Image (tube, rainbow, N blue to C red):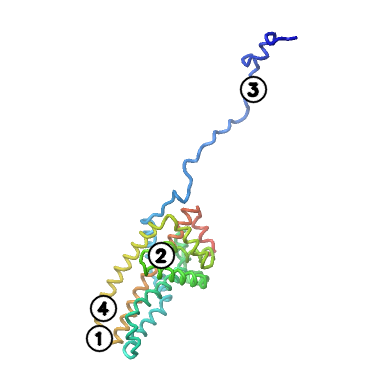
Amino acid sequence: MARPDDADPAAESPASATPAAPPTGPVPAAPTRRRWSRTPLQFQLSVGSTVSRTFSIWLKGLVPFAVLSLAVHAPLIVGMYYFTLARENVPWVQDAAKFSRSIDFITSAVFEWILTGAVAFAVFQRLRGQPAPFVESVSHGFRSGLRVLGTGLTVCIVTTLGFLLIIPGVIATCTFIAAVPAAVVERTGVRASMSRSSALARGHRGAIFGALFVTRLFATVVAVVMFRVVGLEAATTYQDLAIRVAMVEGFAALIVPLSSILACVVYHDLRIGKEGASADEIAAVFD
């Protein structure tokens, strides 16, 4: 019977074993860790970049945007003219005049969202460096008319109710800023568009508020200058006042595209930053 001491040491010793042949072929590279990956938490919306591109797009397309804005706001301009003119002879209009600014605010907000849908094509085309012919912009913009109208009206109602307490209105404005662009690009309904905007804006409401603040401040300064130039207090008759009011509404319509362009730029940047989409992919819906 063999004992452990009688075992062949050469068979047991690793040192005496025949060395394995080295592997042939190219040596595989060692896996490297990704140093950075895009996630929603790592992307931060830039106030400066968003505002600068908003103004750049607005100035480059100033005339087409102005014409489109005047066309969209024409019912409001005409309505304010006749509303002011009627105050001379209709007693109840005299009493309702103090509410005219509130009516003007709400209707302007509705038309602003409609305009957002109308300028979406032009904005996304310019963001990817492509021309945006005026006729084509109008055609594409109003193609989603019902979705845009429903979404814009709902957002307007929600934000207006929120502004009764001020802070909720600000939050709602920042939350649903991308609802109309989402309705145009992704062809979603009212509820889905608002949910989409809320998801995109999450984590970036502060930057959105900053961009809104800058553009609204500029619009307010321009509006004050317009009031001074037109001089509503200098009107001598209701006819003269009605004309001046219509002029103010017309000048204001030239500034409104800023907010609409900003909404599209915010949607564009959030899609690219949070989801890795490309400008061509976003604008592909118009091709």
Q: CA distance from mark 1 to mark 2?
A: 39 Å
Name the residue: 42% across, 67% down: 260
In this rendered view, identify the residue nearer to me: 73 or 96: 96
Label 1 crowd (10 A; few <14 / some 14-19 / many >=20): few
Image coordinates of residue 81 in percent, x first then y, are 35, 83
First reached walking from the N terminus: tag 3 or tag 2: 3
Mark 2 is on which residue type?
Thr
Mark 2 neighbour density, 10 Å: few (under 14) some (14–19) many (20 or more): many
What's the amino acid at mark 3?
Answer: Ala
Residue 152 x %, y %: 46, 70
User: Residue 14 versus residue 1: which sits nearer the camera?
Assistant: 1
Alpha carbon separation for disc pair 2 and 4: 31 Å
Mark 2 vs mark 4: which is more N-terminal?
Answer: 2
Disc 2 is placed on an element classified as helix
Residue at the spot 41% in from the left edge and 52% down from the top edge: 44
| 20 up-or-down from 34: above or below | above
Name the amino acid type tagged 4: Gly
Mark 4 / mark 1, whichever is N-terminal: 4
The label on residue 236 is 1
Q: Secondary structure at mark 4?
A: loop
Label 4 and label 1: CA atoms lie apart by: 11 Å
The residue that label 4 is drawn on is 231
Q: Residue 162's quadrant in the figure?
A: bottom left
Residue of label 2: 173
Give residue 147's position: percent from left, percent from top.
52, 70
Q: Secondary structure at mark 3?
A: loop
**Distance from Cα at disc 3 to Cα at disc 1:** 105 Å
* Residue bearing the label numbered 3: 21
In primary-sequence order, the first of circles 4 and 3 is 3
